Image (spheres, rainbow, N blue to C red):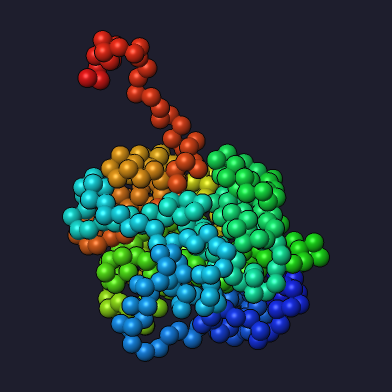
Amino acid sequence: MAAQTVATSANASATPGSVDLGPATGLSCRECGTRFELGPIFACVECFGPLEVAYELPAGDPEALRAAIEAGPNNIWRYAPLLPVPADVASKPSLNPGFTKLVDAANLAKELGVTGKLYVKDDSGNPTHSFKDRVVAIAVEAARAFGYTTLSCSSTGNLAGAVGAAAARAGFRSCVFIPHDLEQGKVVMAGVYGGDLVGIEGNYDDVNRFCSELIGDPLGEGWGFVNVNLRPYYGEGSKTLAYEICEQLGWQLPDQIVIPIASGSQLTKIDKGLQELVKLGLVEDKPYKIFGAQAEGCSPVSTAFKAGHDVVRPQKPNTIAKSLAIGNPADGPYVLDIARRTGGFVEDVTDEQVVEAIRILAQTEGIFAETAGGVTVGVTKKLIENGQLDPSLTTVVLNTGDGLKTLEAVSGTGQTATIRPSLDAFRAAGLA
């Protein structure tokens, strides 16, 4: 869809040049470099390439910037000087996501044969229990700036809940769209916030196409679709994962990081965040490798990577990892570039391996991951076994959501035994 068309859905009060999004100075095409003013547009009118936020980042003493960040709130707003948000963002109604735990996963390391340091960045600790709270928080600020009244999205589940919750907190109406056959836990969590939740017959790619049509229709007037017409701003929220990981490592880059792939935006923005920290002098530059993780039943990026292709061919998803089930990932080609540039890899695992990995993480570190986390841990295990990930280096694995949302994946888990309330029955069960 042409960017000019999308821009018409913004409130007329948001005139060019009047938008305050902090250090953000405009939008830049990732393909041809054409610049645009800040606005609710996501595609370049010259080449239809994706747009990214361009910045005038803080200059000066890195030590002073580090100190200012560390003195900030214990959420993503500590990084406000590096994000497309106004300076007073921390004072506005928000779910205030971020600064989740970086877990020293020594037990998991032993299980997987890792001899270096292994960490799990556990984003299930966010307000709606997934990393999507980060990206939505940034999108809300863009929606405020552009005068929107309704927040919307196309979602595989987690984003729907994050939008519903953020809209309720910030005073927006919400109307979100999901595939009709999502996990029930995600459906309930997305609906409880009181907004409209609409199931679309089909998969995520069908939902996304519908939302693109709605944006260009008068019915979509005043609607901010966080992952469509607000996508350039929304995507920047994933940079905060990179910022936090490095800060929690003592302002150091990890050697290796394993990231799940849905659209691919999270992976590309984490790389962007790492590069920004280097340019600002907040971390010492050194090589790092980025690995992408997919489920075999929806693995267009890993398929392209292994075949040496630059084009990602769409696939029809068929996997229990529904939060990653995007058959035509928008950032797929950029993921390929980053994995190759950093010396990483893009791998996939079967649904059976996903379930096994969920259990391994739960039984070693007490972290109950949703299926996307199972994909990431499963791919990490496979990369180590295949010699593609160095077990002696410092590695960070992302868990992006809570296993309570995808209980169906481990539905065979239950009581060890059912006994009468007596010691004899306990002994007879062989549990003593």
Q: Quadrant of the C terminus?
A: top left
Residue name at image x 37 percent, y 89 percent: 60
Q: How many marks?
A: 0
Give coordinates of residue 382: x percent, y percent: 32, 50
Residue that protrudes farthest toward the top in the picture: 424
Residue that protrudes farthest toward the right in the picture: 218
Q: Quadrant of the N terminus?
A: bottom right
Vertical side of 199 occupied by 285: above or below: below
Give coordinates of residue 73: x percent, y percent: 42, 68
**Residue 302 or 356: which is nearer the viewer?**
356
Quarter assignment of residue 361: top left
Quarter assignment of residue 155: bottom right
**Residue 312 or 195: which is nearer the viewer?**
195
From this viewpoint, is residue 341 visible?
no
Give coordinates of residue 243: x percent, y percent: 38, 70
Give coordinates of residue 241: x percent, y percent: 41, 65
**Residue 352 or 156: which is nearer the viewer?**
156
Residue name at image x 40 percent, y 64 percent: 74
From this viewpoint, is residue 422 visible?
yes
Answer left or right for 113 relative to 39: left
Answer left or right for 214 relative to 302: right
Answer left or right for 218 relative to 315: right
